[in-house]
């Protein structure tokens, strides 16, 4: 198999694009496609300060790497959730993020120590709330709160995450199965700032398959944590990914078509929110972040015994 660009031996075959590329041309294609998504969805400009949520995994480190190559002002944020156990997961993933930051001049990596700041790790909170078998919802809530808090406190215009196409279609599939209209309304490449204390959130990798971000990371020689979070085993999102991957194998391009068709349907008004369904936000009485709850947001209620 030869590269469609230069004729050299190809290292990856993008079946849905009918495009085989060598290592050098794949890197160029990957970076160019990222820039194309940034412009297409008007995510940010070179004048904006960008905060990249870094987990130590392949997607977030690849995103940080690409944004730096494109000349954006991109700093990193690592949230230490205290997920250790036998794998020392948080310790290892934090080390990968710190190592990447150390290889780049004038790049800042902020680390939020959840157990140190709030007195409990994610597993601790899950045990106290009797959700130790499925702490993913608690983990997601904590990460969203802290990402938004740091982005606003440090003056970043945009918060960028490394969600890839496989992540997005798995969430979309689950939301469609249960017709979670509120979640569907908010899903997309860009979640704009609302002026009420929520930072703009963007997903520059939303059109890349997971195998493409993995290939970029390996070709670039980026050192990332290979292990998945120990709590992700058996997660519903992983089952959705398996189902969609089987469909993709039988019909290449299925995932991308599903996602892009959803975005098109949104633009055409399929999920226009009505005034009756609009939820009024107001500041949490403790942290000040927007919430629909009467007094305390869901994050602050986590820390109540």
Image (spheres, grey):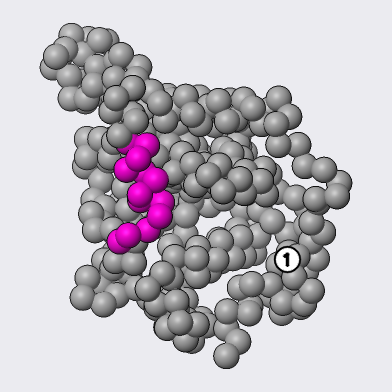
Q: Pick the residue in front: 303 or 153.
A: 303
Residue 99 percent location from the top left of the image: 29, 58
In this view of the protein, can residue 43 be seen by the observer?
A: yes
For this view, does 131 lie left or right of residue 178?
Answer: left
The reply to whether the magenta stretch includes residue 21 is no
Image quarter of the N terminus: top left
Determine the residue positioned at 31% across, 47% down.
Answer: 58
Image quarter of the C terminus: bottom right
Determine the residue positioned at 59% across, 39% down.
Answer: 188
Q: Pick the residue in front: 16 or 205.
A: 16
For this view, does 265 lie left or right of residue 147?
Answer: right
Magenta segment boundaries in residue numbering: 233-245
Residue 40 percent location from the top left of the image: 58, 25
Q: Which residue is mark 1?
A: 291
Rendered position, 52 above or below 150: above
Mark 1 residue crowding within 10 angstroms, few (<14) / some (14–19) / many (20+): many
Residue 297 percent location from the top left of the image: 68, 72
Rendered position, 177 above or below 125: above
Please tell me whether mark 1 sits on a helix, a strand or a loop. Answer: strand
For this view, does 174 lie left or right of residue 229?
Answer: right
Rendered position, 129 above or below 4: below
């Amino acid at each position: 198999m030869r590269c469609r660009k230069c004729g050299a031996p190809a290292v990856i075959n993008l079946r849905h694009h009918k495009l085989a590329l060598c290592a050098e041309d794949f890197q160029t294609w990957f970076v160019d496609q990222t820039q194309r998504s940034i412009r297409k969805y008007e995510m940010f400009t070179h004048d904006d300060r960008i905060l990249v949520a870094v987990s130590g995994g392949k997607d977030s480190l690849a995103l940080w790497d690409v944004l730096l190559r494109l000349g954006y002002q991109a700093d990193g944020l690592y949230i230490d959730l205290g997920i250790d156990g036998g794998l020392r997961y948080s310790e290892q993933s934090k080390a990968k993020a710190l190592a990447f930051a150390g290889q780049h001049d004038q790049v800042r990596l902020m680390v939020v120590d959840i157990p140190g700041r709030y007195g409990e790790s994610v597993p601790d909170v899950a045990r106290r709330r009797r959700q130790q078998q499925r702490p993913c919802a608690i983990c997601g809530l904590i990460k969203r709160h802290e990402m938004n808090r740091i982005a606003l406190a440090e003056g970043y215009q945009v918060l960028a995450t490394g969600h890839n196409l496989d992540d997005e279609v798995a969430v979309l599939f689950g939301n469609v199965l249960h017709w979670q209209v509120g979640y569907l309304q908010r899903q997309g490449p860009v979640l704009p700032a609302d002026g009420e204390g929520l930072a703009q959130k963007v997903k520059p990798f939303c059109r890349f398959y997971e195998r493409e971000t993995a290939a970029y990371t390996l070709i670039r020689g980026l050192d990332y944590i290979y292990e998945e979070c120990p709590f992700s085993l058996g997660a519903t999102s992983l089952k959705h990914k398996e189902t969609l991957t089987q469909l993709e194998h039988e019909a290449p391009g299925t995932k991308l078509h599903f996602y892009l068709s959803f975005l098109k349907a949104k633009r055409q008004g399929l999920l226009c929110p009505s005034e009756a369904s609009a939820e009024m936000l107001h500041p949490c009485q403790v942290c000040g972040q927007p919430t629909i709850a009467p007094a305390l947001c869901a994050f602050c209620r986590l820390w109540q015994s």
